[in-house]
Amino acid sequence: MAGGMNPKAYHLGLIGYPLTYSLSPSLHQAAMQAYGLVGEYRLYPVPPLPQGQKMLQTLLHQMRQGVLNGLNVTIPHKQGVIPFLDELTPEARAIGAVNTILNRDGRLVGDNTDAMGFWSHLTSLSLINRGGKVALILGAGGAARAVAFALLQANWALIIAARRLEQAQRLAQELTQINSSRALSPNIVALPLEQGALRESLSQIHLIINATPVGMPPDLDQSPWPQGLPFPPEATVYDLIYHPPQTRLLKDAHQAGLHAVNGLGMLVEQAALAFERWSGLPAPRELMYRALGA
Ligand code: NAP
């Protein structure tokens, strides 16, 4: 079995905080059931560091010992977990965040399946690549970073727009450094998330990605898209939010006649990739989608 997985019992889980509600257990239980595997996927609420450090170390120790076979990591530990691991995959190193931990012969390896999960879902939609390759990313946090990394690998040009311009500039600068090591000249622009700043670039944009939490509860009727700014007519809108399934941004984009999709597919894909890395088995994606009622 790949990734140190014990074929008799699969003890998996998610580290994050707060973890009141997560779709990950349903996804992984569906994958395990498809292969008749015994086991469970538990939620491990670990408070932010330093308060949660002892708990985090205990869970990692259990993983090193093979008591736990695989862990996912979410907010707020995607970066904080890194110093406690033995190595990182090239993706996790480049993105600077870990969402999946693997056990390779007793060594804990931090991986990141968010970027590839996003890319796999996006390319499965056949909505893009009909023309140019310019993406506008709204937000410059952890998810924006993974999405930007995936798009850069496919040689897209990026406009990163954040309410704090300095955050967008910092991300653009870091991504430029990563990408220039591939001997490409990356085309990354940072802008403030404002109508005036974005208006000029509108006609070039083929893909808009919401990587902010705007549109999630309690801001259900809010959209990150600046008021009064028309959508680029040929663009696809990808909202990383999946709860609710139809955000205000997606409703507005549909109404403007654009293709618009939510982030459920990315969630399923990142889970499918994690399952594959832990088990060495092809993930039953259809069953995983069905487990979420999708
Ligand atoms: P994050 O690291 O906290 O970054 C959030 C970004 O949004 C930051 O740039 C933040 O700016 C900005 N932002 C927050 N509130 C805003 C507002 N009211 N107006 C404009 N910008 C605002 O969070 P993340 O991990 O990147 O997650 C972002 C979203 O992606 C969340 O909704 C998350 O659920 C979703 N996500 C989905 C998947 C999936 O599988 N579908 C995977 C990962 C994440 P400040 O720093 O100024 O607050």
Image (spheres, helix red, strand yellow):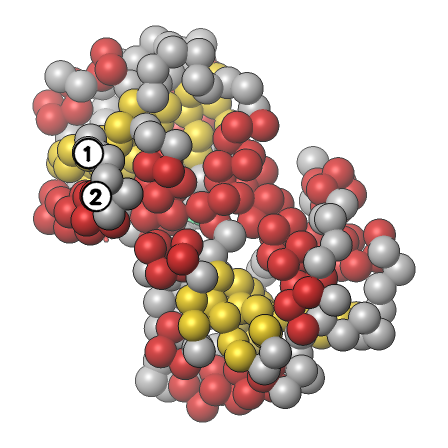
Which residue is located at x 45 percent, y 40 percent? 240
Residue 6 percent location from the top left of the image: 76, 74
Read off the residue under disc 1. 185
Q: Can see residue 206?
A: yes
Q: Can see residue 231?
A: no
Horizontal side of 278 relative to 256 (left or right) equals: right
User: What's the residue type where badge 1 is placed?
Assistant: Ser
Which residue is located at x 36 percent, y 61 percent? 93
Is ligand 1 closer than 8 angstroms to the Cβ of mark 2? no
Read off the residue under disc 2. 180
Residue 72 percent location from the top left of the image: 55, 65
Vertical side of 103 occupied by 185: above or below: above
Which residue occupies the foreground of this view, 185 or 169?
Answer: 185
Comes first in the chain, label 1 or label 2: 2
Q: Verify CB contact (< 8 Å) between mark 1 and mark 2.
A: yes
Q: Which mark is residue 257?
A: none
User: What's the residue type where badge 2 is placed?
Assistant: Ser
Task: In the displayed orientation, state which residue is furthest to the front.
Answer: 183
Q: Residues within 10 Å of mark 2 (few under 14, many from 20)?
A: few
Horizontal side of 76 relative to 173 (left or right) equals: right
Q: CA distance from mark 1 to mark 2?
A: 6 Å
Residue 109 percent location from the top left of the image: 50, 70
Vertical side of 165 occupied by 8: above or below: below
Which residue occupies the foreground of this view, 14 or 145?
Answer: 145
Q: Residues within 10 Å of mark 1 (few under 14, many from 20)?
A: few
Q: Circle 2 — which element?
A: helix
> What quarter of the picture does the C terminus occupy?
top right
Q: Circle 1 — which element?
A: loop
Which residue occupies the foreground of this view, 269 or 3?
Answer: 3
